[in-house]
Image (cartoon, grey):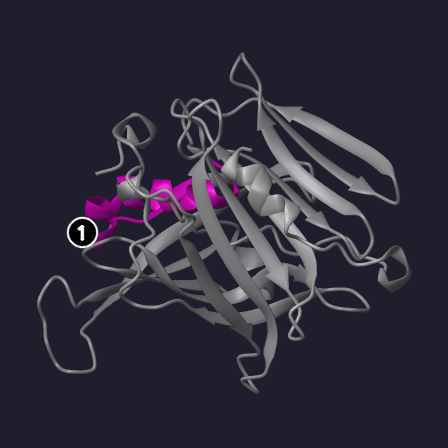
Amino acid sequence: MNRLCAHSSLKHRPPRSTQLRRWPIASVMLGLILTAPLSAEKSQFTTLEGQARDPQTGEVIYQERHSMAQNASGQWVMESDYLAPDGSLFAERTVSFDPKYPQRPNYRLTDYRDDFEEGATTLDDGRVELFRVVDGERKSEIIRPSEDIPLVIDAGFSAFIASHWSELLAGQRLTFDFASAARLTTIPFRLTHVETISDSGGSDSGSSRQQKFKLEPSNWFVRMLVSPIVLTYANDTRALIGYSGLSNIRKEGGGNHNVDIRFPPDHQFSMRQLPSGSRQAVP
């Protein structure tokens, strides 16, 4: 049996009687903008876990569990589980990385509480189909990526930031279109480097530093209404170790959670570890 299939078979979907009605996702990000590749030499799943906490109270809202391996065709596929504080699975996401489009992976996010789905698929001609399913009704929109502005989809953000690492640290502000399946359109964002952080021990070596970035809508009016997302990456591995901002997981009654997520600072899950054919411009 394919390892990915075996992994999926262990999940227990909540019964339909426990499903909650899902309001349309207000945020355009993020699922999490994280990649968790498994080294080709390993035969077992490597997982990465993080707890999404309320920034004000520190209360655990949900847990994320990410893993990655190659499927039968050799394509790298990441699976993400979203677990309630009691450990029950309520949502999951599958992200498939195409070597031709490392910043534009195919993905599908499913919330079992109400059978909500959203996702994106890159077509053979390079266009992208965005889709969402609400109350059993599927809607979709096909978009054509701009030739001038990069298009980023879901977990492909880490590939984007890794490929522009030097420019960001040099002070450049980058703009890109983010594909929002929830809204069936793209939304322009801008990304800037905020600061370099040394570890708590005072060391300033490259292996101990962390880089903090700010992600916010390009439109000035929208920026007034939405708080920025703050992302922290390890300097040496360029792996995501911190995320603060609006989540793609909604709250009961509508709206989306604001969360603070921390991953182990020494974890090795980064785009730089994907096979060279999947990295392309990623350093």
Tell me: 215 left or right of 154. Answer: left
Residue assigned mark 1:
170
Q: Residue furthest right?
A: 17
- Residue drawn at (10%, 76%) of the image: 203
Q: What secondary structure is the magenta-colored segment mainly?
A: helix
Find numbered disc 1 in the image and state the secondary structure of the residue it sits on.
loop
Q: Relative to residue 139, is residue 84 drawn left or right?
A: left
Q: Quadrant of the N terminus?
A: top right
Query: How many marks on residues?
Result: 1
Residue 140, position as x, y percentages in the image: 74, 30
Q: From this viewpoint, is residue 179 visible?
A: no
- Mark 1 surroundings: few (<14), some (14-19) or many (≥20) residues within 10 A: few
Residue 98 is situated, as x and y percent measured from the top left of the image, at 44, 26
Q: Residue at x 79, y 58 (%)?
A: 14
Residue 153 drawn in magenta: yes
Quarter occupied by the C terminus: top left
Residue extent of the magenta highlight: 152-176
The kind of residue on which mark 1 rests is Ala
**Residue at (88, 45) in percent of width and height:** 135
Residue nearest the viewer, comparing 17 with 193:
17
Q: On the picture, is 198 further left or further right than 89?
A: left
Residue at the location (29% across, 55% down)? 268
Confirm whether the magenta stretch covers residue 194. Answer: no
Q: Residue furthest bottom?
A: 57
The quarter holding residue 204 reads bottom left
Residue 254 lies, in percent from the top left, at: 78, 64
Nearest to the observer: residue 17 or residue 143: 17
**Which of the 4 image quarters holds residue 209?**
bottom left
